[in-house]
Amino acid sequence: MQDQGEESPLVFSGEMKPYVIEDYKLQANDIVDINIKTSSKELNELIEIFQEDSRGGGMMMQGARGGGDIFFMNGYSIDENGMVELPLIGELKFAGLTAKEAKLLIESRMVEFVNEEDLFVRVRLGGIRYSALGEFNAAGKHSILQNRVTIFEAIANAGDLTVVAKRDELVLVRQYPEGSRMFRINLNNQKLLTSEFYFIQPNDMLYAEPMKIRELGTGVNFVQTFQLAVTTLSAVLLVLNAIN
């Protein structure tokens, strides 16, 4: 028992939870940011010319600077067959590879044109794109230009959940190379911090179902729904009295 003269602690700290981070496998329709540089001025110029042509030239670059998703404008889109077309190399299959594996694949092909020590390759995801549907204050498609995004950051970016959203049964639909799978997530369970769902992945879909209170009326909370029910009942009674 705490003594009356003893002050309570200012901060209560919970148990440290280690992250579970899965290596994301690239999929069709993903957008990747690829940067290839060499010690050869001629090769660099050739790569830049190819990139300008494949990305739509200066007008598209200007549109990216004016706002919007810069990675969509400047990145490389993985087509429906899982392929990406790159300068000098041609088509490479990225689907099913991690960003690091894709980097190594590019390097293995670029050594045909330049020495390995004179080569720089970077491959990264063009941000995290996901959908937030249902009881979100800003439902729709969203993009966050980060390499890692927690599920709570994704919810905040979508305007947070409404007051009638089920926080113990958030639906997550995750895309895999072989198909899609649906999960139900309890946001109030601390085990979420150590699960593979704490960080969302590109193309995830979040769906927040409404609580039963939403089904009782059109009000966004119990008070509004109750007021609506009372008003409706009063109108019915007035009609019955008029008939009698």
Image (tube, helix red, strand yellow):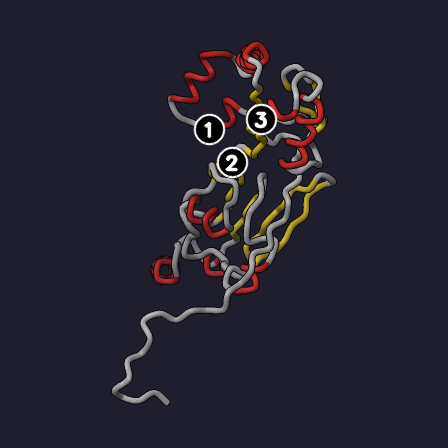
Say the numbered circle drawn on residue 69. Answer: 1
CA separation, marks 2 and 1?
A: 9 Å
Q: Residue at x 57, y 57 (%)?
A: 185
159 or 55, nearer to the observer: 55
Q: Which residue is mark 3?
A: 120
Q: Quadrant of the N terminus?
A: bottom left
Q: Amino acid at mark 3?
A: Phe
> SS for tag 2?
loop
Q: Residue at x 66, y 39 (%)?
A: 25
Dot 3: few (<14), some (14–19), or many (≥20) neighbours within 10 Å?
some
Q: Amino acid at mark 1?
A: Asp
Q: Position of residue 22 (x, y in %)?
A: 63, 48
Residue 19, relative to residue 177: is it above or below?
Answer: below
218 or 243, nearer to the observer: 218
Label 1–label 3 contact, CB within 8 A: no
Q: Which residue is mark 2?
A: 127
Q: Is residue 36 visible?
A: yes
Q: Amino acid at mark 2?
A: Gly
